[in-house]
Amino acid sequence: MIIDGKALAKEKRAEIAKQVEALKEKGVTPGLAVVLVGEDPASQIYVRNKHKACEEVGIYSRKITLPEETTEEEILKIIDELNNDPEIDGILVQLPLPKHIDPDKVILSISPDKDVDGFHPVNAGRLLTGQDGFFPCTPLAVMELIKSAGVDVSGKEAVVVGRSNIVGKPVSMLLLRENATVTICHSKTKDLADVCRRADILVAAVGRPEMITSDYVKEGAVVIDVGINRVGEKKVVGDVAFDEVKDKAAYITPVPGGVGPMTITMLLYNTLLSAQKRVSK
Ligand code: NDP
């Protein structure tokens, strides 16, 4: 069974739009500020897509485009203003930033209560210690996709390939929170295929085109492919060799059309959540 991320995203966005409408009736419009520094073409597309997705569900979106030569001090000042802006519930700084700007310093300057990307160490700590907070959108998307297949995570063997701060580690923590038995793999893991074959739930977040072949997959596993790898001029493939793995897996996400559309949806969700918290304060 192929898990259709596009269809799920459409369904979730319709639910979010309804909740945004309910907030507006109480006089509150959720607001997201997206800060883009420089002219990286991929970043420009991501920012445009986020802006469009906000509009579609009725979230106010403010795009702040800054020139490449903007100083760190100037960005920190803008973020400080956004932290104190009552119209803004979520602040997102599009990464990567130009080389002269320290991304850690910028992320630290965002108020943890407006950190809808979930990258602030306070939110990472909240995730680790089982508290409420904002958690990164791609890992949240992975969990939604697993749940949409009707799979109960509790007690399952989950293997995550990749340990980045934005995908591998947080998705592992979310799986652990839902009582999976989690193994985290990385480039130094020995006998990776053996470890992966233990998985009832296999999450690939590596960034290597079609590295996870059917040899890595247990019959009947749930396979979630986070990878986005450009091959050649136009083709995009995941980290999983979809054509051969789909016959072995019980459920699998395609690339494109799997995790990608759900990631932006979870950003909308986090922004809505932040606005709901503002109302209940
Ligand atoms: P990173 O490059 O930050 O991390 C990759 C991870 O994979 C590292 O932990 C690395 O190990 C591990 N790794 C690399 N090679 C191997 C190997 N041969 N065997 C085992 N592990 C390996 O990538 P991200 O986490 O940022 O992204 C992963 C993928 O997901 C990329 O394709 C990215 O484009 C995609 N992505 C998709 C998103 C979406 O919305 N769908 C959002 C974010 C990312 P080590 O730590 O030892 O170096």
Image (cartoon, helix red, strand yellow):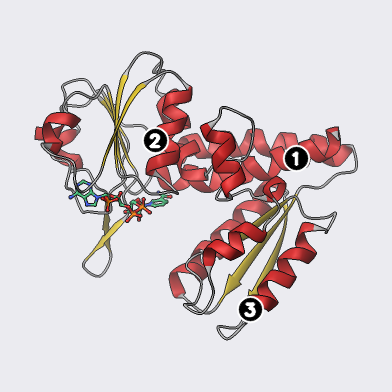
Tell me the kind of residue under disc 1. Val
At a point 58% along the width and 57% down the height, the residue shown is 50
Is residue 145 toward the left or the right of residue 240 in the image? right
Tell me the kind of residue under disc 2. Asp
Q: Which residue is mark 3?
A: 66
Q: Residue 281: x and y, percent?
A: 86, 35
Give the structural element (helix, strand or loop) at label 2: loop
Q: Residue 94: x and y, percent?
A: 55, 64
At a point 15% along the width and 37% down the height, the residue shown is 192
Mark 2 vs mark 1: give the one in front: 1
Give the structural element (helix, strand or loop) at label 3: strand
Mark 3 vs mark 2: give the one in front: 3
Sequence order check, earlier mark of 2 and 1: 2
Q: Which residue is mark 2?
A: 4
Question: Is label 2's Cβ within 8 Å of ligand 1?
Answer: no
Residue 60's place in the image compared with 143, above or below, is below
Give the structural element (helix, strand or loop) at label 1: helix
At a point 61% along the width and 44% down the height, the residue shown is 122
Tell me the kind of residue under disc 3. Leu
Q: Is residue 268 visible?
A: yes
Q: Which residue is mark 1?
A: 20
Q: Residue 279: x and y, percent?
A: 85, 37
Alpha carbon distance from label 3 to label 1 = 29 Å
Residue 96: assigned label: none
Count of labels shown?
A: 3
Residue 104's place in the image compared with 73, above or below, is above
Quarter of the image for the N terminus: give it.
top left
Classify 10 Å Cα crowding around label 3: few (below 14), some (14-19), many (20 and above). Answer: some
Classify 10 Å Cα crowding around label 2: few (below 14), some (14-19), many (20 and above). Answer: many
Place residue 3 in its image quadrant: top left
